[in-house]
Amino acid sequence: MTDAAHDVTNLARAPEGVRRIEWAEREMPVLRLIRERFAKERPLVGLRIGACLHVTTETANLMRTLEAGGAEVAIAASNPLSTQDDVAAALVSHYGIPVHARRGEDRDTYYRHLNSVADTHPTITMDDGCDLVSLLHQDRAEQVKEVLAGTEETTTGVIRLRAMAADDALGYPVIAVNEAQTKHLFDNRYGTGQSTLDGILRATNLLIAGRNIVVAGYGWVGRGIASRMAGHGGHVTIVEIDPIRALEALMDGFQVMTAAQAAAWGDLFVTATGNVNVFRREHFEAMHDGATMANSGHFDAELDLTALRQMAEGHVRDVRENVQEFDIGGKRLHLIAEGRLVNLGAAEGHPAAVMDMSFANQALAAEYVAKHHAELEKRVYTVPTAIDAEVARLKLAAFGITLDPMTAEQAEYVTAWKHGT
């Protein structure tokens, strides 16, 4: 349903979305504590937050938290297949938050939705992939001066932002939430690892045990995927271009191959590099009949889909929900979720307990830039250490865990330089 304030698929699905948002909230105690404080202190009053994020139950709880802090919030999807339509409906009709997102939207609709968020003239941007930042800088440059600061959720977006900063093109400071230890060590590794496997299993019902699994990229996301695949009995090979990460993968017990070697060996291929055309024509030619591909990087660019379609010459069909079959001269290659983020395209994304930490960082980073934007330069910043530590402390407290403080003697010892052998 469409009006000037929103564009969602079906407002009648709102009650279902509310139930699921409330279920996710039970697994998000850190964000709930922040929302309670924000409701009392209202640190975001007077700010307009324009968000380009995956419209999921967890994101809904972040939006509620920002609104509790006094901000005006509008959100568009950061991926055409990641929107949960019931959640979008609930945000609009139950929580009064403008949403511009429909699952399966085409490219034109995607950018129309981004522009709808930009039309609210945000003073803080909140991105997952840098698309809103890029839109403002390239198409609506006159608005850039209105933005005090931004935050960025994912590795791919941070890469783009750092490229902008290196070109002296970044018009305002951005906090790289992805670089928080309580984000990438947990969300990227445990969240993406589990949800990627979940998406693949929901889409295909494949047995992982005994299969040859190729994971391209051994960053935090790749580590998580490889670990989960190995835990399910898969024989895991890593494709890497970074020698240090490749060595780490080898010492973690995985095989390491080139993409060409892995193409002929693998049964299931999962990309998680943040780069483009990791597997392409020559690799598709080497893959065996029945090979299955999925992408867990942010954009649908890690698999050369143009080449894959050309090779199939129109012989493409849907064989399961979220699975396409490409017939290449009698050899069948399978693609999950159109090569988009498999954990959101074919499943529900990260577990709420993991997103609790990521979105706690987002909320606290928004509060931080609201207070300190005038002191910040036009570059990419990491999350302040104090915020990272506070998120970890609150998460431990939610598990009922407390830590020993250092004694006065220990505190003195680690700050002194005269202690010897």
Image (tube, helix red, strand yellow):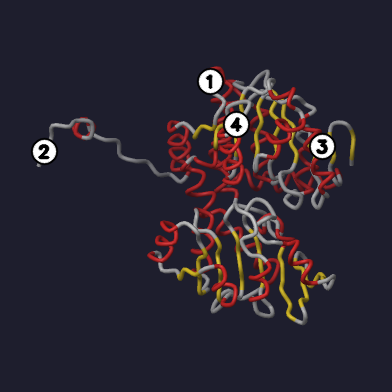
Tag in front: 1 or 4: 1
Q: Secondary structure at mark 3?
A: helix
The residues tagged by marks 3 and 1 sit, at their Cα atoms, a distance apart of: 34 Å
Q: Residues within 10 Å of mark 3 (few under 14, many from 20)?
A: some
**Residue with the most extreme left position:** 421
Label number found at residue 35: 4
Which amino acid lies under the numbered mark 2 shown in the image of this protein? Gly
* Dot 1 or dot 2, earlier in sequence: 1
Q: Nearer the viewer, mark 3 or mark 2?
A: 2
Q: Residues within 10 Å of mark 2 (few under 14, many from 20)?
A: few
Comes first in the chain, label 3 or label 1: 3
- How packed mark 4 is, by other alpha carbons closer than 10 Å (few <14, some 14-19, many 20 or more), is many
Q: Secondary structure at mark 4?
A: helix
Identify the residue under disc 2.
Answer: 420
- Position of 50 with respect to 278 (left or right) is right
Q: Identify the residue at image location x=70%, y=40%.
A: 131
**Are the residues at dot 1 and dot 4 in contact (C-beta closer than 8 Å)?**
no
Q: In what element is the residue under mark 1? A: helix
Residue 122, percent across and down?
71, 26
Q: In terms of depth relative to the viewer, which is nearer, 228 or 105?
A: 105
Under circle 2, the secondary element is loop
- State which quadrant residue 359 falls in: top right
Residue 93: x and y, percent? 82, 37
Q: Observer-nearest residue: 330 or 412?
A: 330
Q: Nearer the viewer, mark 2 or mark 4?
A: 2
Residue type at mark 1: give it.
His
Q: Are marks 3 and 1 in contact (CB under 8 Å)?
A: no
> Mark 3 = which residue?
93
Q: In 3D space, how far apart are the residues under numbered discs 1 and 2 (Cα atoms)?
A: 41 Å
Which of the two labelled residues, at mark 1 and mark 4, occupies the earlier sequence position? 4
